[in-house]
Image (cartoon, grey):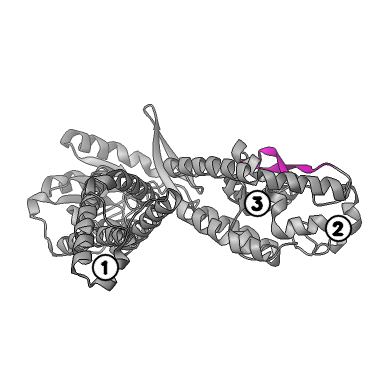
Amino acid sequence: MFREHARLFSILQFAGDMLLTLAAFPLAYVSRLALARAAPLEISRLFNPALRPLADYFWMVGLGVIWWCVVAYTLGLYRPAMRRSDWEKMRIVLESAILMGLFLGFLSFAFKLDLSRPLIALFVSYQACLLCATRLALAAHSKLRSYPSRHLRHVLIVGTSPKAREMGDLISRYSDWGLRILGYVEANGAAPGGGKDVLGSIAQIPQIVADHVVDEIIFVGTEPKDLHMLDDVLVICKEQGIRIRVAVDLFPAKVSRVSMEFLENVPLITFSTTPDPSLALLIKRVMDILISAILLVLLSPLMALVGFLIKLTSEGPVIYRQIRCGLYGRKFVLYKFRSMKRGAEDVLWEIKHLNEMDGPVFKMRNDPRVTPLGRVLRKSSIDEWPQFWNVLKGDMSLVGPRAPLPEEVREYTRWQRRRLSVKPGITCLWQVSGRNEIDFHEWMKLDLQYIDNWSLLLDLKILLRTFPVVLLGKGAR
């Protein structure tokens, strides 16, 4: 019932937001006309270009609304499994509206459209105000509304442990859905303890059900050895049509996300610490393909020039190939412009004692194996341009933890290996946070922070922060 109710609520809210978004543009269009007519001549010139008929903007608004839907979903505005605070919802509404405005501005710039900037600003402002106003109204309504008794769903919790009390507090947060905690029942055959809300022991459930209105029973804090208690209760619930649930806290391991999936009719409890929203990951892959393909085409003349200079200034191949570890340790060939002298790996043992980075990674500020041209390529990150081919192939992503060497992975501690649970990337939090100025332990923590908080918006922020870091050469060696 919880998931179905949440999904229905999200669908209805999304449909309402779509209607309000579509209504915001005609409202912005009318306001733009009114402002231009009412403003003095000197100010009205700021409203150029002149507006075209409203129908001429429908295709552009359609693209903008599609982009807004993707952004809002990615930011979790309509995610049924996550109940957000009202202020957090409004923050996401504002962020998605701003990103839609930036997208429309990009369309106008890229395709040389005579699109009025005040019109875009009004559209974004009206949409954000309408969506925030509806959420504020719903929040106020839910706080003031009291459900009639006949519409309440009474929940009986089996268990009186701290976990059971936490479940009761959690369900109480959904009182706007008409949920009410009827009381608690002592589990494990114990006699009823203190507390007015403890209605009896598990053996007294038949009498409790007979004396009270019970819509659902939830077992909380039940040990695997005590699951036999379910048998008698299941019979009672089946006979009377009462829904029964078991809180899945049977496992001591702490994980980020728990979900229930079905393989045909077999239920599977899934524990995951990695990003798993399939639509957002699909969008990430599409962006990787489009951006890497475009950059490979645009940079091809410069890459040819760099290759010629490498061949001209030192012996050896233009492209350096190295085995790296990708998703879950899958090995792949990483491509880079060669920045070192031929045979550099063979003499690494001679200078390994000069390593300036702790941990299994070798970093040295003035590595004697690097060629003069290679220093320039490394400082500017030009040596990494061929990795766009790795991204296009699917071995890497634009954003993700740096791809490690197999010998580095062998020295990882168990918690550090979790950084392999996503595809490696060309840029990452480490890259934009100081690179080689950060010690190895903090580097690993940044990668796990990226995994735990991943979203398309975070990828976009990292990409935007990468440009000034590359231009300034911050932390490069």
Mark 3 vs 2: CB contact within 8 A: no
Tell me if residue 384 is in the magenta stretch: no
Q: Residues within 10 Å of mark 1 (few under 14, many from 20)?
A: few
Q: Can you see residue 396? A: no
Q: From the viewer's perspective, is the residue at label 3 or at label 1 nearer? A: 1
Q: From the viewer's perspective, is the residue at label 3 or at label 2 nearer? A: 3
**Circle 2 residue:** 352
- The quadrant of the rendering that contains the N terminus is top left
Specify which label sits upstream in the sequence, 3 or 2: 2
**Circle 3 residue:** 402
Magenta extent: 317-335
Q: Nearer the viewer, residue 16 or 451?
A: 16
Q: Nearer the viewer, residue 27 or 217?
A: 27
Q: Nearer the viewer, residue 473 or 39?
A: 39
Give the residue drawn at x 21%, y 60%.
Answer: 33
- Residue 446 drawn at (x, y percent): 59, 60
Specify which label sits upstream in the sequence, 1 or 2: 1
Mark 1 vs 2: CB contact within 8 A: no
Amino acid carrying mark 1 in the image: Ser
Amino acid carrying mark 2 in the image: Lys
**Circle 1 residue:** 44
Residue with the most extreme top position: 264
Kindly state the secondary structure of the residue where label 3 is placed.
Answer: loop
Amino acid carrying mark 3 in the image: Arg
